[in-house]
């Protein structure tokens, strides 16, 4: 991913690896939820962050299903990743999302 935007890097992956990255990202979201729900006071900001994670997951899961069904009816690869970064920012989750993205993108991927 060095020297490339996350969106371009993701777009160049195989369908299998895209599914792996996004599945890992959704897993990382569960860790963020745990941290947000346990560590931060429950206020409007917390509700907004939890809602944001739900909305991002809502964008990711149909994409994963579409890839596995080999359907073209899904977001463009680069558009999805760009949208996720934008959503994270708008929900106050930029740092947590970027950390989750790095954890997901650093997985050992297969060449297939």
Image: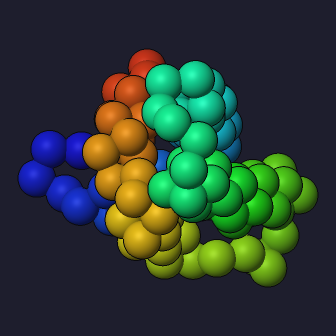
- Of residues 67 and 21, the one nearer the viewer is 21
The quadrant of the rendering that contains the N terminus is top left
Q: Position of residue 95 (x, y in %)?
A: 30, 45
What colouring style does the render use? rainbow
As drawn, is 105 to the left or to the right of 67? left
As drawn, is 108 to the left or to the right of 52? left
Query: Is residue 22 among what the camera can see?
Result: no
As drawn, is 78 to the left or to the right of 56? left
Q: Position of residue 78 (x, y in %)?
A: 44, 71
Above or below, 69 relative to 99? below
Residue drawn at 33 percent across, 35 percent down: 99
Q: Quadrant of residue 17?
A: top right
Q: Position of residue 109 (x, y in %)?
A: 47, 27
Residue drawn at 48 percent across, 24 percent down: 39
Residue drawn at 38 percent across, 40 percent down: 96
- Of residues 14 and 77, the one nearer the viewer is 77
The quadrant of the rendering that contains the C terminus is top right
Query: Is residue 39 among what the camera can see?
Result: yes
Residue drawn at 42 percent across, 71 percent down: 90
Q: Position of residue 25 (x, y in %)?
A: 56, 38
As drawn, is 65 to the left or to the right of 5? right
């Amino acid at each position: 991913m060095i020297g490339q935007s996350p969106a371009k890097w993701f777009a160049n992956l195989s369908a299998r690896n895209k599914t792996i990255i996004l599945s890992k990202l959704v897993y990382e979201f569960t860790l963020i939820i745990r941290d947000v729900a346990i560590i931060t006071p429950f206020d409007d900001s917390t509700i907004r962050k939890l809602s944001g994670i739900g909305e991002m997951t809502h964008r990711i899961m149909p994409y994963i299903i579409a890839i596995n069904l080999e359907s073209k009816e899904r977001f463009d690869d680069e558009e999805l990743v760009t949208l996720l970064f934008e959503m994270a920012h708008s929900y106050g989750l930029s740092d947590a999302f970027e950390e989750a993205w790095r954890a997901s993108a650093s997985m050992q991927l297969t060449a297939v």
